Image (spheres, helix red, strand yellow):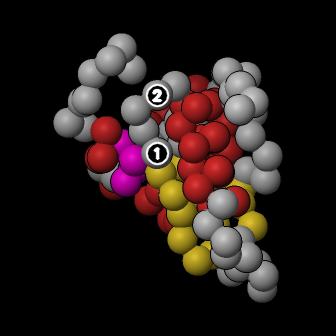
Amino acid sequence: MDDVCHAAFPEFSYAKAYTCVTMGVSSREFRDKYTATDDNAKIGQINSMMAISGKMAAFPGGVLLRNGENKIVGAIGVSGAAGDEDEYVALTAAWESGLSLRTMPEEHSCTTVRSL
């Protein structure tokens, strides 16, 4: 984000991971569930959930982790770049951990990734 190290990035990361664990979906899916249409009631609902908990985030960068039995075992939250890039970093961390984890989302949607 414009070459700054914002003090809130760790809090954003936590909020993304917290959202995944409490809602059982990625932070992207959480956002999309309530904002895919112009339904003011759903938008009000997501705003209320975020305001009441004070710990939730409705933007990409939170990846839900499940084990082989499909049980939630945690989440990874990343912040500091664009949402798609944050999500890509979180997914890559899970995939390269060497653990047998299913991620949600299962694939990245980052368009700025370059092959190394």
Helix, strand or loop at label 2? It is: loop
Please tell me whether residue 58 belongs to the stretch shown in magenta: no
Residue occupied by mark 1: 78
Residue ranking furthest to the front = 116
In the rendering, at what x and y percent does residue 43 appear?
55, 32
> In 3D space, how far apart are the residues under numbered discs 2 and 1 (Cα atoms)?
9 Å
Q: Residue at x 67, y 72 (%)?
A: 98
Q: Residue at x 44, y 59 (%)?
A: 18
What amino acid is labelled 1 in the image?
A: Val
Question: Which span of residues is magenta-colored?
Answer: 12-16
Asked if residue 19 can be seen in this view, the reply is no
Observer-nearest of 23 and 48: 23
Asked if residue 28 can be seen in this view, the reply is yes
In the rendering, at what x and y percent does residue 10 appear?
30, 46
Image marks 2 and 1: residues in contact by CB distance under 8 Å: yes
Helix, strand or loop at label 1? It is: loop
Q: Is residue 49 above or below residue 76?
A: above
Residue ranking furthest to the bottom = 69
Q: Main secondary structure of the magenta part?
A: helix
What amino acid is labelled 2 in the image?
A: Ala
Quadrant in which residue 93 is drawn = bottom right
In the rendering, at what x and y percent does residue 71 appear?
69, 80
Please tell me whether residue 13 belongs to the stretch shown in magenta: yes
Q: Is residue 86 above or below residue 101?
A: above
Q: Is residue 76 above or below residue 86?
A: below
In the rendering, at what x and y percent does residue 106 appear?
79, 53
Residue occupied by mark 2: 81
